[in-house]
Image: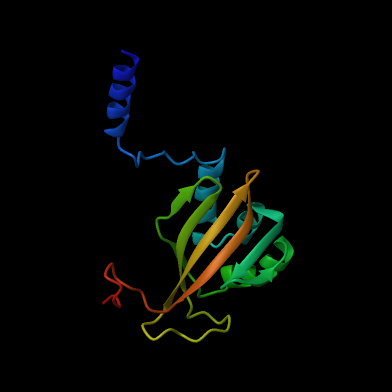
Amino acid sequence: MLGRIVGATLMMTASLPSEAQVPPPPSLPGQDTLGEQLVRSIETKNTAAYGTLLSDNVSVFEDGKQVARNKVEWLNTFGKKLSAKGVAFKMSPGFSSSGRLLFLEYFNSAGSWGSAVPTHCCWSYDAVAYDVAGGKVTSIRRLRGGDTKLDDRGLPAK
């Protein structure tokens, strides 16, 4: 009898999907609000509000190279770009996982902060991951995307 029970149990468990989906962990407390505030501060070019969202010890990387070791260094660099006249910012709908926010940032680079105007004038694109902990951005990882937007097939968008 015990053999039949074990056999039936094995048959039942064998028919269960072996690749059962495990739900992702929830966002950290306050992470969703932080994401909203991040988008709002960048799109409204509010450097002071943006600064309040950063940890004092935030680390910032562009294309894998560390460009800032703390909030002061990063605001000295990015703050100039964010507040530059003639530069506009837009954020794409992003993604959120526990402890990380990911956005595509579009910025109009026709302002006078030093870069050449892209060929399709005037937007440039970066993928940006924000690591969060304790209600603050603790790390920013930027991947420079360039000035050509791609469509969903990977071709230059028209």
In front: 142, or 3?
3
User: Is residue 26 found left or right of 83 in the rendered image?
Assistant: left
Q: Position of residue 82 (x, y in %)?
A: 57, 68
Q: Residue at 67% of width from left, 62% of height from top?
A: 59
In front: 96, or 74?
96
In front: 10, or 50?
10
Q: Residue at 34% of width from left, 21% of height from top?
A: 6
Q: Would you place residue 31 above or below residue 39 in this image?
A: above
User: Is residue 60 found left or right of 125 in the rendered image?
Assistant: right
Question: To which quarter of the image does residue 69 belong?
Answer: bottom right
In front: 126, or 6?
6
Question: In which quadrant will I find the N terminus?
Answer: top left
Question: In which quadrant will I find the C terminus?
Answer: bottom left
User: Is residue 40 found left or right of 136 in the rendered image?
Assistant: left
Q: Residue at 48% of width from left, 57% of height from top?
A: 102
Q: Position of residue 103 (x, y in %)?
A: 46, 59
Q: Residue at 53% of width from left, 84% of height from top?
A: 115
Q: Position of residue 151 (x, y in %)?
A: 29, 70
Q: Would you place residue 144 above or below residue 22 in this image?
A: below
- In the current view of this chain or complex, which residue is farthest to the top? 1
Q: Position of residue 140 (x, y in %)?
A: 60, 61
